[in-house]
Amino acid sequence: MRPSDFIVRKFRSAALERAFRQDYARRYAGQRRIASAIFTLIWVYFAVRDLSRPDNLDPDNLYHHHLVYLRLATAVVMSVAVGLLWGRRAYDERWAVGLLSIWTLSCWFTLLRQMELALIEMAWRSVFPVLTLVLFMIFTSYRLRAITALWLVLLCVTSFHFTLYWWP
Protein backbone atom coordinates (compact mmCIF):
# COMPACT_ATOMS: atom_id res chain seq x y z
CA MET A 1 0.00 0.00 0.00
CA ARG A 2 1.45 3.33 -1.03
CA PRO A 3 1.14 6.31 1.31
CA SER A 4 -0.82 8.09 -1.40
CA ASP A 5 -3.50 5.37 -1.18
CA PHE A 6 -4.18 6.16 2.45
CA ILE A 7 -7.20 8.44 2.36
CA VAL A 8 -8.62 10.34 5.27
CA ARG A 9 -12.25 11.14 4.68
CA LYS A 10 -13.18 14.75 5.04
CA PHE A 11 -16.86 15.44 5.25
CA ARG A 12 -18.62 18.53 4.02
CA SER A 13 -20.68 18.93 7.14
CA ALA A 14 -20.60 17.78 10.73
CA ALA A 15 -24.01 16.14 10.33
CA LEU A 16 -22.72 13.97 7.49
CA GLU A 17 -19.70 12.92 9.55
CA ARG A 18 -21.93 12.11 12.53
CA ALA A 19 -24.21 10.01 10.31
CA PHE A 20 -21.20 8.14 8.93
CA ARG A 21 -19.89 7.38 12.44
CA GLN A 22 -23.31 6.18 13.59
CA ASP A 23 -23.68 3.93 10.57
CA TYR A 24 -20.16 2.55 11.08
CA ALA A 25 -20.81 1.89 14.77
CA ARG A 26 -24.19 0.27 14.08
CA ARG A 27 -22.72 -1.96 11.40
CA TYR A 28 -19.95 -3.38 13.61
CA ALA A 29 -21.57 -3.21 17.07
CA GLY A 30 -22.46 -6.90 17.09
CA GLN A 31 -18.99 -8.00 16.09
CA ARG A 32 -17.40 -5.81 18.76
CA ARG A 33 -19.79 -7.08 21.43
CA ILE A 34 -19.24 -10.73 20.67
CA ALA A 35 -15.44 -10.41 20.38
CA SER A 36 -15.04 -8.53 23.65
CA ALA A 37 -17.48 -10.84 25.47
CA ILE A 38 -15.64 -13.96 24.29
CA PHE A 39 -12.25 -12.61 25.27
CA THR A 40 -13.58 -11.48 28.65
CA LEU A 41 -14.92 -15.00 29.28
CA ILE A 42 -11.53 -16.44 28.32
CA TRP A 43 -9.88 -13.99 30.73
CA VAL A 44 -12.23 -15.00 33.56
CA TYR A 45 -11.62 -18.68 32.84
CA PHE A 46 -7.87 -18.25 33.16
CA ALA A 47 -8.24 -16.11 36.29
CA VAL A 48 -10.31 -18.84 37.95
CA ARG A 49 -7.93 -21.51 36.70
CA ASP A 50 -5.01 -19.65 38.28
CA LEU A 51 -6.66 -20.03 41.69
CA SER A 52 -5.79 -23.72 41.61
CA ARG A 53 -2.26 -23.30 40.22
CA PRO A 54 -0.15 -21.51 42.83
CA ASP A 55 2.85 -23.73 42.18
CA ASN A 56 3.02 -22.89 38.47
CA LEU A 57 2.57 -19.15 38.72
CA ASP A 58 4.49 -18.48 41.88
CA PRO A 59 6.42 -21.45 43.31
CA ASP A 60 7.42 -19.57 46.46
CA ASN A 61 3.78 -18.50 46.92
CA LEU A 62 4.82 -14.89 47.50
CA TYR A 63 2.57 -13.12 45.03
CA HIS A 64 -0.06 -15.71 44.16
CA HIS A 65 -2.97 -13.92 45.80
CA HIS A 66 -1.88 -10.62 44.32
CA LEU A 67 -1.79 -12.14 40.82
CA VAL A 68 -5.24 -13.69 41.21
CA TYR A 69 -6.79 -10.52 42.66
CA LEU A 70 -5.21 -8.50 39.89
CA ARG A 71 -6.74 -10.74 37.24
CA LEU A 72 -10.13 -10.79 38.92
CA ALA A 73 -10.17 -7.00 39.31
CA THR A 74 -9.34 -6.66 35.65
CA ALA A 75 -12.10 -9.12 34.83
CA VAL A 76 -14.53 -6.83 36.65
CA VAL A 77 -13.35 -3.77 34.70
CA MET A 78 -13.52 -5.69 31.43
CA SER A 79 -17.00 -7.00 32.27
CA VAL A 80 -18.27 -3.50 33.03
CA ALA A 81 -16.93 -2.29 29.69
CA VAL A 82 -18.56 -5.23 27.89
CA GLY A 83 -21.83 -4.59 29.74
CA LEU A 84 -21.78 -0.96 28.65
CA LEU A 85 -21.12 -2.09 25.07
CA TRP A 86 -24.49 -3.84 25.12
CA GLY A 87 -26.20 -0.58 26.00
CA ARG A 88 -27.83 1.97 23.76
CA ARG A 89 -24.77 4.20 23.51
CA ALA A 90 -22.83 1.41 21.77
CA TYR A 91 -24.05 2.88 18.49
CA ASP A 92 -22.01 5.99 19.18
CA GLU A 93 -18.63 5.35 17.58
CA ARG A 94 -16.60 7.44 19.99
CA TRP A 95 -18.26 5.88 23.03
CA ALA A 96 -17.66 2.35 21.74
CA VAL A 97 -14.05 3.06 20.84
CA GLY A 98 -13.46 4.60 24.27
CA LEU A 99 -14.90 1.53 25.99
CA LEU A 100 -12.86 -0.83 23.83
CA SER A 101 -9.73 1.19 24.54
CA ILE A 102 -10.36 1.02 28.30
CA TRP A 103 -11.04 -2.69 27.96
CA THR A 104 -7.82 -3.31 26.03
CA LEU A 105 -5.61 -1.15 28.21
CA SER A 106 -6.89 -2.64 31.47
CA CYS A 107 -6.11 -6.10 30.14
CA TRP A 108 -2.72 -5.05 28.85
CA PHE A 109 -1.50 -3.17 31.93
CA THR A 110 -2.58 -6.07 34.12
CA LEU A 111 -0.45 -8.37 32.03
CA LEU A 112 2.52 -6.05 32.36
CA ARG A 113 2.11 -5.98 36.13
CA GLN A 114 1.75 -9.73 36.16
CA MET A 115 4.91 -10.00 34.09
CA GLU A 116 6.81 -8.09 36.76
CA LEU A 117 5.59 -10.34 39.57
CA ALA A 118 5.75 -13.78 38.00
CA LEU A 119 8.82 -15.80 37.15
CA ILE A 120 10.54 -14.99 33.89
CA GLU A 121 9.59 -18.29 32.25
CA MET A 122 5.95 -17.92 33.22
CA ALA A 123 5.86 -14.29 32.19
CA TRP A 124 7.07 -15.08 28.70
CA ARG A 125 4.59 -17.92 28.32
CA SER A 126 1.65 -15.92 29.63
CA VAL A 127 2.28 -12.49 28.08
CA PHE A 128 3.28 -13.23 24.49
CA PRO A 129 0.13 -15.19 23.59
CA VAL A 130 -2.07 -12.50 25.10
CA LEU A 131 -0.09 -9.77 23.31
CA THR A 132 -0.77 -11.61 20.07
CA LEU A 133 -4.45 -11.96 20.95
CA VAL A 134 -4.74 -8.29 21.94
CA LEU A 135 -3.17 -7.20 18.66
CA PHE A 136 -5.48 -9.58 16.79
CA MET A 137 -8.50 -8.13 18.60
CA ILE A 138 -7.43 -4.57 17.86
CA PHE A 139 -6.86 -5.16 14.16
CA THR A 140 -9.65 -7.57 13.27
CA SER A 141 -12.44 -7.89 15.78
CA TYR A 142 -12.84 -4.32 16.92
CA ARG A 143 -13.07 -2.76 13.49
CA LEU A 144 -11.45 0.39 14.81
CA ARG A 145 -10.46 3.27 12.68
CA ALA A 146 -6.83 3.18 11.60
CA ILE A 147 -5.59 6.00 13.80
CA THR A 148 -7.15 4.52 16.96
CA ALA A 149 -5.77 1.07 16.22
CA LEU A 150 -2.35 2.57 15.57
CA TRP A 151 -2.35 4.41 18.91
CA LEU A 152 -3.42 1.30 20.84
CA VAL A 153 -0.84 -0.92 19.16
CA LEU A 154 1.95 1.61 19.67
CA LEU A 155 1.02 1.98 23.33
CA CYS A 156 0.95 -1.78 23.90
CA VAL A 157 4.19 -2.52 22.05
CA THR A 158 6.20 0.37 23.52
CA SER A 159 5.00 -0.34 27.07
CA PHE A 160 5.96 -3.99 26.57
CA HIS A 161 9.45 -3.02 25.44
CA PHE A 162 9.84 -0.56 28.32
CA THR A 163 8.80 -3.29 30.74
CA LEU A 164 11.40 -5.62 29.24
CA TYR A 165 14.01 -2.87 29.45
CA TRP A 166 13.29 -2.11 33.10
CA TRP A 167 12.81 -5.76 34.10
CA PRO A 168 14.43 -6.37 37.51
Image: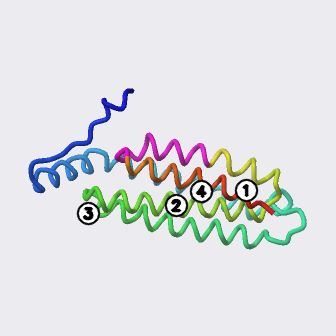
Instruction: Based on the picture, tell me whether residue 134 belongs to the magenta stretch.
Output: yes
> Residue beneath label 4, please?
43
The residue where tag 2 is placed is: 105
Identity of the residue drawn at 44% across and 40% down: 140
Q: CA distance from mark 2 to mark 3?
A: 23 Å
Q: CA distance from mark 4 to mark 2?
A: 14 Å
Name the residue nearer the viewer: 34 or 135.
Answer: 135
Q: Which residues are magenta?
A: 131-146
Mark 4: which amino acid? Trp
Residue at numbered disc 1? 165
Marks 1 and 4, how far apart at CA: 26 Å
Question: Disc 3 on helix, strand or loop?
Answer: helix
Question: For the residues carrying marks 3 and 1, which lies nearer the camera in this image?
Answer: 1
Element under label 2? Answer: helix
Q: Which of the 4 quarters of the picture holds residue 47?
A: bottom right
Q: Earlier in the sequence, mark 1 or mark 2?
A: 2
Decide: few, some or many residues near mark 3? Use Cα within 10 Å; few <14, some 14-19, many ≥20: few
The kind of residue tagged 1 is Tyr
Give the amino acid at mark 3: Arg
Q: For mark 1, give the secondary structure.
A: helix
Mark 1 is surrounded, within 10 Å at the Cα level, by few (under 14), some (14 to 19) or many (20 or more) other residues, namely: few
**What residue appears at the point 53 percent right and 56 percent down from the top-left corner?**
40
Which residue in the structure is indicated by mark 3? 88
